[in-house]
């Protein structure tokens, strides 16, 4: 019994440490088990209908969906050259803000997850393995317990929208959140 508690304690602190040091960008549930990223196409299944408010299409047209692709632009290459970075699409110094879960290792992802889809739903709403199911999603309390961040705040945005972005133009939460709005229909 003590052995298992010890093991549990160690694995929990390991997860916390690894997360603090930024080796993994995954969240753990209360049992210390990592919740994996499922990718935007899993959310698309339900969040692309008119009835719900087409969040998927709204996101797809937003700059966040282009974030990885834009790392291949001449502008990105020029920024990278100045910083002695050979390929911005392979370097964590750029991927950390231009993709979801940059640097996460395989066990934290599942096969449907595609880094090239840029700053995806789960960058802001948290990894979806535990909440992206109908019975959970339709119950706000259950979704929260499963790791859903239903209304991401300023701090979430500022993890990327900050002066360490080589092109930082400033950030105004109130205005910028409106520019990426994708409400549930009827709200
Ligand atoms: C099986 C269908 C389904 C999948 C898959 C799904 N959702 Fe949902 N989601 C829903 C439904 C239905 C609602 C509306 C619930 C309601 O009206 O309270 C919802 C609501 C939400 C909300 C608002 C919750 C609130 O309390 O305001 C967010 C945020 C959300 N989903 C994000 C996601 C993300 C991100 C993914 C992918 C990782 C995802 N959903 C996958 C069906 C789904
Ligand atoms: C860049 C961050 C970001 C990304 C990417 C993002 N969201 Fe959101 N989402 C938010 C914020 C912020 C809110 C809350 C807005 C508010 O409070 O007015 C929100 C709200 C929602 C809501 C609830 C809206 C409501 O009316 O309560 C749903 C559903 C949702 N997002 C689904 C998605 C899905 C599905 C994707 C991917 C296709 C996605 N989001 C991508 C930041 C994001
Ligand atoms: C994981 C990193 C990340 C997070 C978190 C994030 N963003 Fe972004 N955001 C980006 C990147 C990268 C771009 C530029 C994408 C491009 O154009 O290639 C961007 C672009 C934008 C733009 C367009 C900026 C412009 O000047 O054209 C808006 C508006 C925006 N984000 C709002 C938000 C809001 C609001 C939040 C929080 C709810 C948020 N973002 C969270 C990475 C992020
Ligand atoms: C700290 C997070 C962060 C890092 C690290 C980062 N970016 Fe960005 N990038 C952003 C955000 C946020 C935007 C939206 C504009 C801004 O900076 O306010 C952006 C916008 C861009 C744009 C403009 C896209 C457009 O056309 O509007 C380019 C190009 C770009 N980044 C290239 C890079 C390259 C190359 C690297 C690596 C050397 C990099 N970024 C590293 C966050 C980041």
Image (cartoon, grey):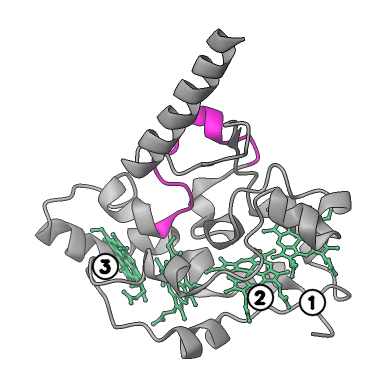
- Nearer to us of marks 2 and 3 is 3
Cα distance between the residues tagged 2 and 3: 24 Å
Does mark 2 have its CB less than 8 Å from ligand 2? yes
Span of residues in magenta: 98-112
- Identify the residue position indicated by label 2 in the image: 58
Q: Are marks 2 and 1 in contact (CB under 8 Å)?
A: yes
Across and down, in percent, residue 141 comes to 78, 58
Say above or below: 130 vs 2.
below
Q: Secondary structure at mark 1?
A: loop
Based on the picture, tell me whether residue 107 belongs to the magenta stretch: yes
Q: Tell me the residue at 82%/81% (across/down).
A: 185
Q: Is mark 3 within 8 Å of ligand 4?
A: yes
Q: Secondary structure at mark 2?
A: helix
* Along the viewing direction, whichever of 42 and 160 lies nearer the viewer: 160
Q: Is residue 60 magenta?
A: no
What SS does tag 3 mark?
loop
Occupied quadrant, residue 169: bottom left
Query: On the picture, is 39 further left or further right than 115?
Result: right
Percent position (x, y) of residue 66? Answer: 48, 66
| Res 45 seen here | no
């Amino acid at each position: 019994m003590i052995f298992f508690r010890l093991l549990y304690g160690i694995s929990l602190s390991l997860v916390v440490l690894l997360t603090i040091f930024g080796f993994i960008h995954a969240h753990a549930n209360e049992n210390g088990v990592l919740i994996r990223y499922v990718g935007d196409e899993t959310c698309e299944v339900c969040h692309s209908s008119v009835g719900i408010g087409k969040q998927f299409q709204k996101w797809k047209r937003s700059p966040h969906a282009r974030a990885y692709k834009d790392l291949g632009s001449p502008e990105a290459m020029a920024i990278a050259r100045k910083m002695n970075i050979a390929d911005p699409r392979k370097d964590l110094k750029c991927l950390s803000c231009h993709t979801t879960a940059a640097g996460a290792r395989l066990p934290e992802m599942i096969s449907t997850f595609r880094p090239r889809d840029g700053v995806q739903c789960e960058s802001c709403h948290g990894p979806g393995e535990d909440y992206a199911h109908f019975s959970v999603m339709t119950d706000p309390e259950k979704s929260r317990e499963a790791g859903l961040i239903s209304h991401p705040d300023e701090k979430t945005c500022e993890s990327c929208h900050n002066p360490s972005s080589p092109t930082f133009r400033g950030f105004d939460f109130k205005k910028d959140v409106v520019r990426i709005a994708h409400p549930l229909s009827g709200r």
